[in-house]
Image (cartoon, rainbow, N blue to C red):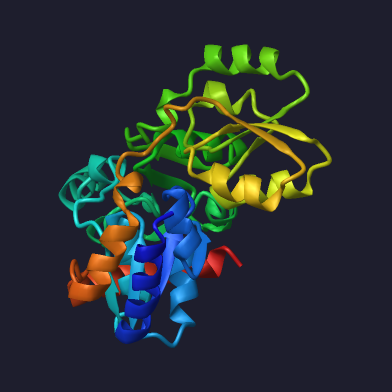
């Protein structure tokens, strides 16, 4: 870790009156300088309780938008402007509007991995942590779920009472994990539990000992009596797993499980962002208002 950048960030953070939050898929040194590391929506909620006027969100664009929606009075900065989410880009507000016309009367449940504009066209938002509870709690039986078809399929199997239509989106990083790779690595580490993200394909989650959110994976590993784990999600999570469980062994499914956009953030980009006040995130008031209603419904149903 570059100590010079760390000291510069500490100094600039005070001058800018800023809090730094980082997603668990960020580079290790970025996680190390953050005030909090976590899943995307948890970070946005965390920021609402902070007194600082500026939020530096080390993640991708939709995450920074959520932080702005929940804290509209604060300045939200993202260190790298073109850090996006391929899955979120697989659906636009215009596409969702047209899709809804094919299914009149259906409620729209949208994964948090989506733009503010898409959230604004949705009835409720879900995260990988609360999707099952939220979907089960919805009064509507007929539901459009997007953009992640894998998470949607994972939830649909557990909610046979719901009629769920899936948007055809996915996470390119989690899609790299194949069933045959899982079988092979389980043979290599027969005593290890397999922990995967529900953004993986159904044939992968079907082989897992646990399928859940990034935080869910971290919590499961900490609570488990097992000493060895195979991890099927973005490689950045290994930093927290090893940090929190020095007595346990973790094997990443593949060294190729890297989200290029998450890795764009560096200590230098954080320092530059703070120094120049660069890459401020804004969300139009009408979009923010509608998106917040969908987020508030998620919070109500997810209690």
Q: Is residue 101 left or right of residue 37?
A: left
Residue 178: image location, x then y, percent: 49, 18
Nearest to the observer: residue 223 or residue 269: 269
Q: Is residue 298 visible?
A: no
Q: Is residue 271 left or right of residue 214?
A: left
Nearest to the observer: residue 41 or residue 121: 41
Q: Count the marks: how many?
A: 0
Residue 113: image location, x then y, percent: 36, 50
Q: Residue at point 44% right, 76% down?
A: 47
Question: Does 100 sit above or below residue 251?
Answer: below
Residue 73: image location, x then y, percent: 30, 85
Q: Residue at point 23% right, 74% down?
A: 275
Q: Is residue 238 left or right of residue 142?
A: right
Q: Residue at point 48% right, 44% down?
A: 236
Residue 89: image location, x then y, percent: 23, 44
Figure quadrant of the C terminus = bottom right
Q: Is residue 156 visible?
A: yes
Q: Is residue 80 left or right of residue 179?
A: left
Figure quadrant of the N terminus = bottom left
């Amino acid at each position: 870790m570059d100590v010079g950048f760390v000291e510069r960030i500490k100094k600039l953070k005070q001058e800018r009156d800023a809090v730094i939050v980082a997603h668990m898929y960020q580079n290790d040194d970025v996680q190390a300088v953050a005030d909090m590391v976590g899943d995307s929506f948890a970070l946005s909620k965390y920021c609402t309780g902070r007194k600082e006027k500026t939020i530096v969100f080390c993640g991708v664009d939709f995450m920074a938008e959520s932080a702005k929606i929940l804290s509209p009075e604060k300045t939200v900065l993202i260190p790298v402007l073109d850090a996006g989410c391929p899955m979120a880009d697989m659906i636009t507000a215009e596409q969702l509007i047209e899709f809804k016309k094919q299914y009149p009367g259906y409620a729209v449940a949208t994964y948090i991995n989506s733009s503010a504009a898409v959230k604004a066209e949705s009835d409720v938002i879900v995260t990988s942590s609360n999707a099952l509870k939220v979907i089960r709690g919805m009064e509507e039986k007929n539901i459009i779920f997007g953009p992640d078809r894998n998470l949607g399929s994972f939830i649909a199997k557990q909610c046979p009472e719901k009629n769920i239509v899936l948007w055809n989106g996915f996470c390119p990083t989690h899609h790299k994990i194949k069933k045959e790779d899982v079988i092979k690595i389980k043979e290599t580490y027969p005593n290890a539990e397999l922990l995967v993200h529900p953004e993986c394909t159904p044939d992968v989650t079907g082989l897992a000992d646990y399928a859940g959110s990034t935080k869910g994976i971290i919590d499961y590993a900490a609570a488990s009596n097992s000493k060895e784990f195979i991890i099927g999600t973005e490689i950045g999570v290994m930093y927290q797993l090893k940090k929190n469980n020095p007595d346990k062994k973790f094997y990443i499914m593949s060294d190729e499980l890297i989200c290029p956009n998450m890795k764009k953030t560096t200590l230098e980009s954080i320092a530059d962002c703070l120094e120049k006040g660069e890459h401020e995130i804004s969300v139009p008031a009408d979009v923010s208002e509608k998106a917040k209603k969908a987020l508030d419904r998620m919070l109500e149903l997810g209690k």
